[in-house]
Image (spheres, helix red, strand yellow):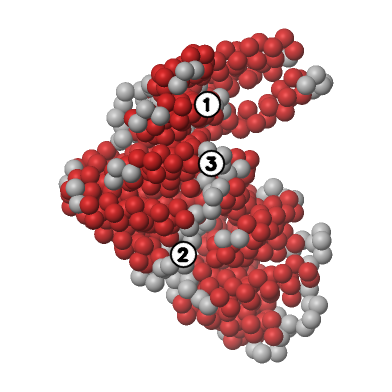
Amino acid sequence: MTLDQVELLRRILFNLGQTALALFEHTDAPADLDAAIRAARAALATSAGGGLDPSALLANLATMLLGRFERFGAAADLDEAVLVTRTALIVLGDEDPHRLDWLSQLGSSLRLRFDRLGRTADLDEAISAARAVIAATPDAHPAQAGRWVNLSNALATRFERGGAPSDLDEAVRLVRSALDAVPDHGPDRARVLSNLGSRLWTVFEQSGSAADLDEAVRMADAAVAATTDDNDPALPDRLSNLGLTLHARFGLSGDLADLGTAVRSGRAAVSATPDRHPELPGRLTNLSIALRSRYERLGELTDLDAAVLASSVAVSATPGDHPERARFLSNLGAMLMFRFQRKKYPADIHDAVEAILAGVAATPGGDFERANRLSNLGSALQLLFAVTGALTDLDQAVARCRDAVTAAGDNSPDRAGMQANLAAALHVRHGRTGDPADLDEAVALLRSSTAATPAGHPSRAWLLTSLGLGLRSRSEWAPARDAWRTAALIADAPVADRVLAGQLWGRMAASTAQWQDASDGYATAVRLLPQLIWRGVSRHSREELLGEWTGLALDSAACAVAAGHAHQAASLLEQGRGVLWTQLLEHQTDLAGLRDAAPALADRLAAVGAALDPPPAHQGSNSPPTEPWRAAGHTSMIGQLLPSTASICSGNDV
């Protein structure tokens, strides 16, 4: 075959590959991308020995391989992309003007391979390559900001896997410099903003500073706003990062607006991520965590079912050798634990223990997440004991919780929660064995955890309630009552925790005939019921939640009578008994008024309400529901209808 014939064949193969690639972008069919890569390989092989410069063919093949890895996550594609890039660097030589671009791509590919396979040598080489590129890049070069970001990403990854604090400091400095270097409306600004938000999120994880977190939220939000193309492949990652930071800020402030936006951002990120995309499991996991938090705060069972489903799909979509699989397994176990506590499906707690145990087994000894996973395993084993009654399960729960506290160290921001988990297991074991040492240790741990938690922190109510239970077991009545009183009055705490604390406060005061204090405690709990059973939760969930507090209003009224407040007793009794009916009547009245002003809009809201609030399909079943995301679309529709409704109610035209 002559050189001209070789050149013609090479061009045909190259064009065939480009055509197949364009077809894949239209059809999203993996077979089309596979055909494009086969043609690119053949074109490269055809050029060998013909004296033709293969650099363009190498670039074409490397880009396709990286694209297929990023789309489907096959490690073999990443290995081949690294090999092709190394080959290009050898072929080009030191003086080629494109050498720095290839070296930068090698660093990015090696970092991706580290993320996928966890090889430390890949990450170290990626950092060395990125440094070499920056050293050879002139000041004010158009690619300088992007190259700073590449090195920042690699350094941040090394810090997160046990690197030195100086890695994180340098990573933040680099990305701040990149932000200063890119134009306000330039095409790279969204990428730089997103990376700065990610760096600041990591800083917040170390510092716990609300200021660091606020800046991380601002950068993540700005990155989403700066992404003007809804089809930008980077948009799902930016949405997921925004949801992650907003969820963390909700954890500090208790602001439901942050939580709602975190859930919406997480859902949008998942919806925009193709099936089999390597980042899909992480985005599903982030969404599940936000959904679980909203369930904890509002009590809507569909949120919890959606969290279980999202975390289960995340595990199923993750290869067995993926370094993040341990995190996804642990998260699935946590979701199943929460649902067991609400619905008492025995299968959930058995599956939870299995998932968390697998997650712990897959977590290296030096990993900073190991302590959290051990603590979760201890909590799951404690719940398993409630099903099996086997003391060995309880002993294992105490042992794993103790291992977690030891592994966390004295300076961990999660230490208070881990101590509380250990205290809970010890308290339960004291109830089984009567060993006073377990009870004394539990109380000491809870005192320490409470003291380490800021006064207005949402988790403080749970810690104080647990402390009160321990003190009651030691017959320390007054300190127990004081702990519950304090817990019930924490405004930003989950409402369910506050209701329980108010009930315990009232019950303890009543047991010692302190009727005014008892009346105050019970009244606090009753007055919180409308917040616990709010209208944004489905009717079935409201009925379930209200059923958990049967008798609360009656006890409250009885104590009010004993305290000499008969009128207040009648009011509390009616308030407690009529929460759901009042909401239903208000809902009907509001809709009737809306129907007078805008009948079409009222009909649409009624249809959505009916879809959101059907008769419970699984009532009386002892198996988990199979369609936990049934209401998601209707919920988003309500978000679209509310502005029109508000405008009508305020007397404005729509």
Identified at 58% across, 22% down, the residue is 608
Proximity of marks 3 and 1: CB atoms separated by less than 8 Å: no
Given residues 277 and 266, the one toward you in this image is 266
What amino acid is at disc 2? Ser
Give the alpha-carbon distance from disc 2 to disc 3, as whole Å: 24 Å
Quarter of the image for residue 386 reads top left
Does 225 appear above or below 615?
below
Percent of width and height locating residue 425: 29, 50
Q: Earlier in the sequence, mark 2 or mark 3?
A: 2
Identified at 35% across, 66% down, the residue is 406
Tag 1's secondary structure?
helix
Residue at numbered disc 3: 490
Percent of width and height locating residue 46: 57, 76
Does 131 appear above or below 78?
below
Does 346 appear above or below 139?
above
Percent of width and height locating residue 564: 47, 18
Residue at numbered disc 1: 527
Judged left or right of residue 293, residue 326 is left
Quarter of the image for residue 41 reads bottom right
What amino acid is at disc 1? Arg
Is residue 27 in view? Answer: no
